Amino acid sequence: MTAESASSVLLALDASVRETGWAVFRDGEVAASGVTGLKTRSKVGPDVRIAHLIESLTELAGEWLPQVMVLSQPSGINWPVPALDLLLASLTAWSSERRLPQFSYTAQEVRTAIAGHPNASRDQLGYAIMLLLGLIGQGRSTHEWEAIAVGHYHLTRKEQTPA
């Protein structure tokens, strides 16, 4: 076993049907981050977008070999949304096929822990996580900061039970 394969790798997602932010943590540190989504002006159905996300996650998993996946749950909607249901079911199936424990947190609990209040804006959360991790001045998208925040939240919370 090499030193690289012995390291702990976590894949964190700010999952969305249109654009998903991801962050990879290796041994508790942010190793990489990015955004995946179809870049097209034409109308594309959620099933096609989610299939693209799953392909992207498969590539990331092949490169980083994560042992855990964490997810910031889409929130703020109090009625059924078929596209979000498909997204969450697809992510659960993907992590299950790879035997990756999946942890899921609400945006409110992550924002409370990182920024101090549950209704912190995306910008406030991004700035708070930059300060907390000493990443001021790094150019990342809002989705990346959200993924980094949920990954950091998972790594620093006391009680961890898979979803």
Image (cartoon, rainbow, N blue to C red):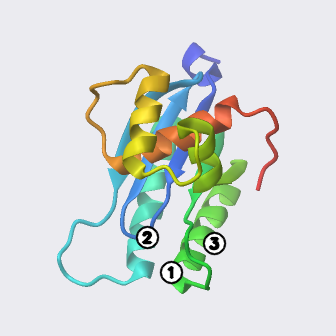
User: Which residue does the numbered mark 3 point to in the structure image?
Assistant: 89
Residue at (59% x, 14% y) in the render: 3
Residue type, numbered disc 3 = Ala
Lateral position of residue 3 relative to residue 41, left or right: right
User: Which residue does the numbered mark 1 point to in the structure image?
Assistant: 83
Instruction: Assign the N terminus to one quadrant of the image.
Output: top right
Expressed as whole percent of the image width and height from the top left, the position of residue 124 reads 41, 43
Residue type, numbered disc 2 = Val
Cα distance between the residues tagged 3 and 2: 12 Å
**Number of marks drawn:** 3
Establish if 79 lies above or below 71: below
Residue at (55% x, 65% y) in the render: 74
Crowding at mark 1 (Cα within 10 Å: few <14, some 14-19, many 20+): some
Q: Given contact means CB atoms under 8 Å apart, are the residues at marks 3 and 1 in contact?
A: no
Front position among marks 3 and 1:
1
User: Which residue does the numbered mark 2 point to in the structure image?
Assistant: 17
Residue type, numbered disc 1 = Ala
Q: Given contact means CB atoms under 8 Å apart, are the residues at marks 3 and 2 in contact?
A: no
Expressed as whole percent of the image width and height from the top left, the position of residue 58 reads 48, 53
Expressed as whole percent of the image width and height from the top left, the position of residue 141 reads 31, 46
Q: Earlier in the sequence, mark 1 or mark 2?
A: 2
Q: Secondary structure at mark 3?
A: helix
Instruction: Assign the C terminus to one quadrant of the image.
Output: bottom right
In the foreground, 64 or 79: 79
Establish if 132 lies above or below 18: above
Lateral position of residue 125 relative to residue 72, left or right: left
Q: Earlier in the sequence, mark 3 or mark 2?
A: 2
Q: Given contact means CB atoms under 8 Å apart, are the residues at marks 1 and 2 in contact?
A: yes
Q: Secondary structure at mark 1?
A: helix
In the foreground, 108 or 63: 108
